[in-house]
């Protein structure tokens, strides 16, 4: 009897959505789901192709990134997930992909400007791009420090992870999170689509202004907060 | 016995075509179909994923945007649809998407120039981009005013909704309409393809001239009006 | 008993490949196959969606563009096909699409430069773009004149339709042909891929030189002529 | 009894992955797998569409490019594969495609800069672009010389084929290799994705700096060498 069975299934289903949504090539991505009660999360095993993945392959780790259960080695990005779960005590899932347009913005080391309501429906500021990591951190505990690179960037830009659920790690690729891993997967697809739209917008009009504040506020509040009226309210 | 059964089915089938045509990600779009005799239209419920959508989920609303029948909450864009049905008394369907290239032009706040016969087969002028909404309207009845933002833009540019069945709402995304919702869906796909072609055309030749008037007239009249000879004449 | 049955099937199968190859949206394209013995060709009916198309729907026309057999109205581009069959007495098929990248080059009114061996495997010069039609021709027998617009462009550029099997009609879209309609369909897909590659090449390096003559000759002769050695020689 | 049966199957399966991965249009690509014990490799027959390909169609050739077994004519690029197998005695497979973005960089005659960790996960330098071939080589034994064009480029840039498993042949298209043909196919898909990301990166920020050396080293060593920790270590 696997006490992590439902957690593994949740992580498995989230991982399988990544290639279905066109967000990963081969094994370039990973999703994890947390069980706060047990203090562990389930994550994709390292380097296993999606077509071969099974729910029971998901690896269980604690918030120090130590493997707790599972026969396979966890994703090489496990410590980054662990740091985010440890520091942000109310998130339920984390996703990392190398989706094409999001990664291009990350490689260009540019925040993604907020140009339209598709963006404002999900967050109220630019999608931040964390500066590339300092050498001493790269040479140290790299994946662990990637977690702090993400957290520090939000802190420096005065952003709240509860309302800003996506980031670009400079020279690397996007990370997203959410109150569930399903929401984190959703955010990865939104990040990619917004990245593509912003790219095209600047190609059409390099002087495109940022979306006006009233529209940002209106669209974000349609979907978030007490006065939201998008969806079925459940 | 559902008196709106066939109307719901019509709206349902139109909505389902949007993801099939690659025009929507997740729930970023909605289609509605009108019954002029009953003075109501059927529209997608808010925030319901396309894969879960059923014909009976379609929500029935009147031209003030008030819900008349249905268990779910209607699309958050319902009032925009209502205004268009109320003001344009001979349209049969309305579609809104955040399709990638159309949205990029909307975000760039640029009309889509008329460069070729693919465009002229469908309309004789640029695809207009309505300027972003004034703050007092955003802070007021936003979705209702989006309807008038569309109508006012056509009026200011001296365009007729009967021959110009698509628009970009600046900083937002495209809206289309037609004598049936099926035609409105078709127009959404045409808008996206024309938006992509125009984008590429300007990348290849930033000084591309507008299509000459004789070709515009020729191609539009091949498909529209008394002397049209495209299609099977039925 | 339909005396055109096999010709209709040949045209039908060619038409059905166009959406499968991603070359047409809705009904924006048509293919025809000729029977030189009978002096007729079979072409797609006008405005019929590909999903509804049946072999028996193909319309039989003569080289004046007059309908000889079939219940439906032929493609609005029928007279263009007719002119090409009449003037080029050894071609077996003609295809017209509004494929995205080919159409973008046509709208930009630019020849597609020859940058690589993918292009040289198929033709030895730029893919020509015919200048937009003169007004008196547009106002006259438009589709008939489109045929001569194509033929005149090749003549002016001293190109042979036997080795140059594709053209862009300026402000409009590509036309291709070949000794069979299957080859014409193949050429439409090649034209689109070469158009996309050339677009990207110029974005990467706006000063990309034309492919050197020795490589053009080498690659074209690998696939064409007496000393060709590509394929199975049958 | 076919003594090359398993080798043919290996080459067949690799070839079939190329269209599945979106790397080839029609017959524009080929994969081969080597049997070092027998001193031969199996390669795709020339000009046969992928849908018609069968395992028994694979052609067996020696390292001089001479056909040893098989009814069909081998790929026109066979001699290029032969040279690479002869000179690089520990590679197991070779793949050639005209994948869209890789070919665009090859046509632009530009190395693909190293901008991010997706690239550094696979190689530590730019993806090299060999200069277009000298005329005397083109006019000589062209496909044979293409092999030496590849080898010479790596030598001149002081690159090792064991760690740099991909190259662009200028004005032509990518070639990749690996210890197995499966790895060579994987490298072709990585090359295409990295080519697309680098293209987009430069469009977003034309002054994007190269990835810093510490990140290059870190990411490459995560996946390669004695201290690698990516994957399942098998």
Image (cartoon, coloured by chain):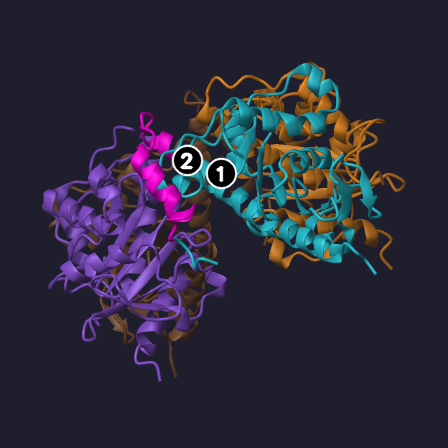
Chain colours: A cyan, B purple, C brown, D orange
**Which quadrant would the N terminus of chain B be assigned to in this image?**
bottom left
Judging from the image, mark 2 belongs to the subunit labelled A
Q: Which residue is mark 1?
A: A163
Q: Quadrant of residue C113?
A: top left
The location of residue D233, given as percent across then percent down, is 84, 38
Answer yes or no: is residue D152 visible.
Answer: no
Write down the region rendered in magenta. A200-229
Mark on residue C127?
none
Q: Quadrant of residue B109?
A: top left
Answer with mark 1 or mark 2, whichever residue precedes in sequence. Answer: 2
Tell which of C106 and C88 is nearer to you: C106
Position of A184 with respect to D44 (left or right) is left
The location of residue A38, given as percent across then percent down, is 75, 48
The location of residue A66, given as percent across then percent down, is 80, 37
Position of D203 with respect to C153 (left or right) is right
On the same chain, marks 1 and 2? The answer is yes
SS of the residue under disc 1: loop
Mark on residue A124?
2
Decide: is C196 above or below C3. Answer: above
Position of D100 with respect to D54 (left or right) is left
Sort mark 2 into few (<14), some (14-19) or many (20+) by Cα contacts within 10 Å.
Answer: many
């Amino acid at each position: 009897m696997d006490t992590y069975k439902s957690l593994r299934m949740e992580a498995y289903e989230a991982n399988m959505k990544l290639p279905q949504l066109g967000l990963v090539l081969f094994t370039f991505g990973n999703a994890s789901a947390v069980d706060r009660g047990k203090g562990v999360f389930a994550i994709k095993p390292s380097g296993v192709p999606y077509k071969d993945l099974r729910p029971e392959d998901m690896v269980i780790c604690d918030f120090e990134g130590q493997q707790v259960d599972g026969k396979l080695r966890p994703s090489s990005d496990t410590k980054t997930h662990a740091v985010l779960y440890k520091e942000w005590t109310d998130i339920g899932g984390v996703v990392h992909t190398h989706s094409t347009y999001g990664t291009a913005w990350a490689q260009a080391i540019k925040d993604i400007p907020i140009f339209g309501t598709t963006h404002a429906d999900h967050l109220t500021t630019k999608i931040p791009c964390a500066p590339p990591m300092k050498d001493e951190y790269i040479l140290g505990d790299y994946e662990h420090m990637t977690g702090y690179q993400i957290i520090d960037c939000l802190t420096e830009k005065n952003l709240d992870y509860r309302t800003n659920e996506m980031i670009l790690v400079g020279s690397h690729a996007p990370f997203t999170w959410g109150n569930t891993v399903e929401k984190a997967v959703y955010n990865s697809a939104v990040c990619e689509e917004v990245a593509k739209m912003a790219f095209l917008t600047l190609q059409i009009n390099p002087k495109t202004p940022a979306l006006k504040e009233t529209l940002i506020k209106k669209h974000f509040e349609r979907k978030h907060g007490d006065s939201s009226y998008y969806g079925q309210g459940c």
